Image: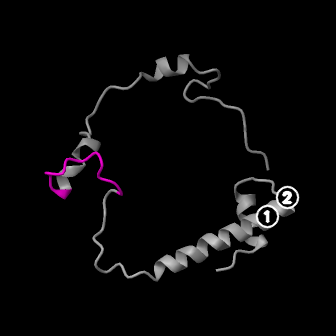
Amino acid sequence: MKVTEKDVTYVADLANLELTDQERQNLAKELSSILDYIELLDQLDTVNVPPMAQTSDRLASPEKTAGEKFAYARRDDALRPSLPHQDAMKNAPGSDGDFFKVPKVIER
């Protein structure tokens, strides 16, 4: 697949990035190269490759089943008290009483 400088310019504008002509050319080449590699990977036969939930089981216990191996990475979803709203607002450098006020950072 060929990524054009027009494509790079479009994405750079969305990300609010200013690129030089040379940077645009380089990015177009690099992104095209990445997409070419992905197309190559798409040609691999993965029919007999089992899906993975994790890319590494180096921390998992080998004697456990697939569903149990990564139990260490999960925690119960428990309701806990949070910081009271008024206390959070006390630390705000600016507030309208309900919300934090922050300076505008995106200009267009």
Q: Is residue 97 rendered to the left or right of residue 29?
A: left
- In the image, residue 80 lies at what x, y percent? 30, 29
How far across and how far down the image is residue 24, in percent? 79, 64
Q: What residue type is labelled 1?
A: Arg
Q: How far apart are marks 2 and 1 (CA)?
A: 6 Å
Q: Name the residue under label 1.
A: 24
Tell me the amino acid under the disc marked 2. Thr
Say left or right for 104 vs 64: right
Q: Is residue 29 magenta?
A: no
Q: Which residue is drawn at 24% across and 42% down?
A: 72
Out of 77 and 35, give the one closest to the viewer: 35
Give the residue at mark 2: 20
- Left or right, 11 with respect to 71, comes to right
Q: Quadrant of the N terminus?
A: bottom right
Question: At x 66% / y 73%, what residue is drawn?
Answer: 32
Circles 2, 1 touching at the beta carbon (< 8 Å)? yes
Q: What stretch is highlighted in magenta?
A: 55-66
SS for dot 1: helix
Q: Which residue is drawn at 32% across and 25% down?
A: 81
| Residue 32 image label | none
